[in-house]
Amino acid sequence: MRDPETIEEELALFAEAIEAGIDPFPEPKKPTPWAKYATAWFMIILMISFASKILSRALP
């Protein structure tokens, strides 16, 4: 499918999309902070394991 060359062609495509039940301008999705939470927990686990290795070598 090619891009519309005129405004009339573009408006016709919008009309077809609306008739087909497709929203041509959907609401943007809200970002979820799951990646930040996963990275934070990963860093916490790394720091705890690193600290436990150091403490196990320092304290016999």
Image (cartoon, rainbow, N blue to C red):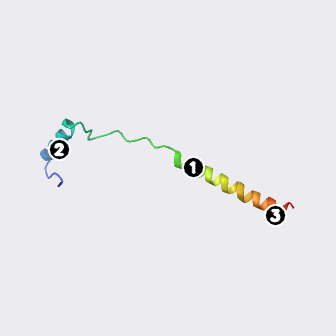
The numbered mark at residue 20 is: none
Residue annotated with mark 2: 13
Q: Which residue is mark 3?
A: 57
Figure check: 7 above or below 55: above
Per the model, the C-alpha gap separating discs 3 and 1 is: 29 Å
Look at the image and tell me in which quarter the N terminus lies. bottom left
Residue drawn at (78%, 61%), measured in percent from left and top? 54
Of the numbered discs 3 and 1, the one sitting upstream in the chain is 1
Inspect the image, locate mark 2, and give the three-letter code of the amino acid beneath it. Answer: Leu
Q: Could you say whether the residue bearing mark 1 is in a helix, strand or loop?
A: helix
Q: Is residue 25 left or right of residue 19?
A: right
Per the image, label 2 sits on a secondary structure element best described as helix
In the picture, measured across the screen, residue 43 lies left or right of residue 26, that is: right
Residue linked to disc 1: 38
Q: Residues within 10 Å of mark 2 (few under 14, many from 20)?
A: some
Q: Amino acid at mark 3?
A: Arg
Residue type at mark 1 is Ala
Q: Residue at x 17, y 46 (%)?
A: 10
Cα separation, mark 3 vs mark 2, equals 69 Å
**Residues at badges 3 and 2 in contact (C-beta under 8 Å)?**
no
In the image, residue 55 lies at what x, y percent?
A: 80, 59
